[in-house]
Image (cartoon, rainbow, N blue to C red):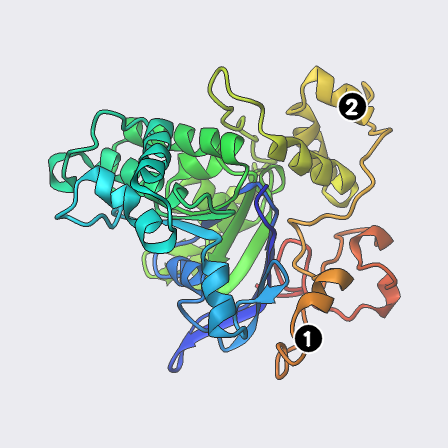
Amino acid sequence: MGVKVVVEGLSKSFGAQTIWRDVTLTLPPGEISVLLGPSGTGKSVFLKALIGLLKPEEGQVVIDGVDVCSCSDSDLYDIRKMFGVLFQDGALFGSMNLYDNIAFPLREHTRKSESQVRDVVMEKMEMVGLVGSESKLPGEISGGMRKRAGLARALVLDPQIILFDEPDSGLDPVRTAYINQLIVDLNAQVDATFLIVTHDIGTARTVPDNIGMLFRRELVMYGPREVLLSSNEPVVEQFLNGRTQGPIGMSEEKDAGQMAAELAELGKDQGVPHIVPQLDVSQGLPRRTAVQRRQDRVMANLGSLTPAAQQEILSTLTVQEKQRYGVTDSGVVTRPPNQRTESMAGSLSTEEVAKVPAGAAQGQRPSPTPRTSGAEDDAFWAPGESVSEQPAKRGWFGRKRGGK
């Protein structure tokens, strides 16, 4: 299974321009997460920070006990071997055919024989539906095929974390649907941790297990898909519905008066947004284990949501799922899972903190700590800590208390 990626208090600037600040989230192992946001909010910069190509001014990115932001070059080299990356345009070598493009990482980073390389390359090409196109050059195939070739290359080293930088850019709706289905199917087969940066509303609403939203240099919300899709947070609801009414304007931010008038108009008949079904795996593939892990987190923390959001989430459960969680006809959950939410919080466990080299976080601000909304619940806090001992820091979705 993929590994967990814990991001704590991450901030990045270029000169005097702040890209984003104090970003805290956890990418749960083996699950698909999506990062949304208007153009220019630093989503691709965030991917580069995760893989160590850009150094943030503050914060940590902890993967397998190693802080990417402060580790040695040799440790960073080893960590990068855990990543596979699908670039926006595929980033294929134009002078190489597809076979050689996909074989390139194996020839560079392993000592496999050519027969072993061929076995791996053909396996990955079959997974993405490119068998028979080995001898074609990137300029001889469609944009969708280039994306799939880039994805096959990202898979050849069997990475535990795969980053997708706008995999649907430049594709028509049909090819986008095929890419989305391919991503879900691959996750079921390899069980790696996926992070997708996208602007496509259909992808954001149907593919991921978890959704995050960057806006105005902040992580506005982050959590399971059920929570964000049923949220009335103005910027999240505007983006996921593709509306002009809301905080996002043509130049990212709107005039305060105009935004207030639009939100007041929307609020007249505002209800809880409908949760669309998640894309399922293709016939014949095993069910994604990530789905149940995510549902367990949602059901364990259902009581922290508004009653309307709770009812909308419960309405999406199948008969078998309702039986599993003991949901009665009146909507009462009698058997909630007993576990702490991972994808809604960015805090490191005691064991993970112990693995980070001493001094790695020197000079950093205190790490944000998750909270509940509504009644406080000790289950949200790290072991050995009480709610009363926690300072006011960050909400369990990633939004600051009292922040915009």
Q: How many marks?
A: 2
Q: Name the mark on residue 228.
A: none
For the residues bearing labels 1 and 2, Cβ distance under 8 angstroms: no
Q: In this view, does 340 lie above or below 334?
A: below
Task: Name the image quarter holding the C terminus.
Answer: bottom right
Q: 382 left or right of 158?
A: right
For the point 60% across and 45% down, the residue is: 29
Alpha carbon separation for disc pair 1 and 2 = 39 Å
Q: For mark 1, what is the residue? A: 366
Q: Which of marks 1 and 2 is nearer the N terminus?
A: 2
Measured as percent of width and height from the top left, residue 279 is found at 49, 27
Identity of the amino acid at label 1?
A: Pro
Q: Nearer the viewer, residue 240 or 185?
A: 185
Q: Residues within 10 Å of mark 2 (few under 14, many from 20)?
A: some
Measured as percent of width and height from the top left, residue 243 is found at 40, 42
Label 2 sits on a secondary structure element that is: helix
Q: 211 left or right of 54?
A: right
Measured as percent of width and height from the top left, residue 178 is found at 34, 27
Q: In this view, does 195 lie above or below 294?
A: below
For the point 72% across and 48% down, the residue is: 341
The reply to whether residue 50 is in sight is no
Q: Name the mark on residue 324.
A: 2
